Image: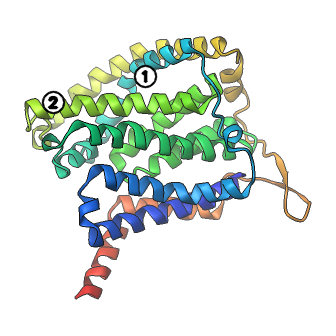
Amino acid sequence: MNAKRANWAFLFMIIAYIAVAILAAFFLPAVANNILLSNLLVEVAIFIPILIPMLISREKLTDFLEFHKIKPGSVLMIGLYTFLTAPLLTLFNVISQFWVENEVISMMDSYQIANMSLLPLWLSLGVIAPVFEEVICRGAVYRSYRRSGSAFKAMILSAVVFACLHMNFNQAAYAVVMGVLAVLLVEATGSLWSSILYHGLINGSNCLLMYFSLKMDSDIFDQQAVTLDTLFYGTGLYLILAAAFAPFAFAVLVWIEKHEGREGTLGAIWRNRKWSPEPYMNKKGKMKKDKLITVPLVLALILCLLEMTGILLGAIVALLLAVRA
């Protein structure tokens, strides 16, 4: 599987996401109002477009996706890496709220999280989302982009894809940073399991924190209480914490890299960051250069932008209401 197919898959993922979200809202309200079912439906919908080209390629998926074993010591250090990178992710989350609302808190309110049991919430956010999204973004998409010759550009673009799949500016702001951090972890370990664990720890810990906070005080995350002063103080605090913790997070990455016997892998990402497309054999047996930026990718990004600004959704909903009337 190459970058061209990955970009086509990304375009169909965006179309599937929008279609499923609208259809569920109009025709499957019971599913749309259930966080576990609605999230599972969306994740499966965006997974199918990337699964098909992977199967068509007839590659051994465990090798292509890099489902390799991780040493126990590395597993423990991934937990530390998660803790040390959390302030950086929170920093971008807070900064984004100068312009947009916190989408996770809005989701908590819409699903009435305080009144539901913990298990379906944790399964949805801490297990289902990490597994599907990591297989898609750090697995199929990143590995396909990496074959174009630049791990650095593959890392950045796969992080953009990951951010776009969240379909809102708030989560996209820190998802793009998380996408880069997850790729560095995958390269340090040589295994997709590392990013699945990392993603699961981030989502799972945030899920537990928000759930029990809401149980104690249902108004604790009232967005009306978020002021500019609060955001400025939050930005300053997490900027300091992120700057203090980042060097230690990188040190943990280097330790994991050496522990897994992959010395020099992280440095190679930066040294080989320049664009150097690798040729591949097309169906006619001719050598072609695989490009990262293609028309399907651009179209997918435009659709994402229209959806995230509400323009596309508003137009579709108005059309559906007119048809039903």
Q: How is the image coloured?
A: rainbow
Give the residue type at disc 2: Ser
For the view shown, which residue lies furthest in the right direction?
Answer: 285
The answer to whether residue 216 is above or below residue 58 is above
Label pair 2/1, CB-CB below 8 angstroms? no
Say which residue appears at 68% left-offset and 29% top-offset: 269
Element type where label 1 sits in the image: helix
Number of marks in the rendered image: 2
Residue nearest the observer in this picture, 139 or 232: 139
Nearer the observer, 216 or 252:
216
**What residue sits 49% from the left and 19% below the top?**
78
Instruction: Say which label, 2 or 1, has the lower sequence index.
Output: 1
Q: Position of residue 245 (x, y in %)?
A: 41, 15
Q: CA distance from mark 2 to mark 1?
A: 21 Å
Q: Specify the quadrant of the image occupied by residue 213.
A: top left
Give the side of residue 249 with respect to residue 319, left or right: right
Which of the pair 45/9 is nearer the observer? Answer: 45
Q: Give the secondary structure at mark 2.
A: helix
Residue at numbered disc 1: 82
Q: Residue 95: x and y, percent?
A: 31, 36
Residue position marked by numbered label 2 in the rendering: 213
Q: Residue at x 36, y 34 (%)?
A: 203
The answer to whether one can see residue 231 in this image is no
Q: Quadrant of residue 231?
A: top left
Residue 322 against residue 1 in the figure, above or below: below
- Report the front residue among 169 and 55: 55
Q: Is residue 245 above or below residue 298?
A: above
Q: Is residue 140 above or below residue 304?
A: above
Q: The residue under label 1 is which amino acid type? A: Thr
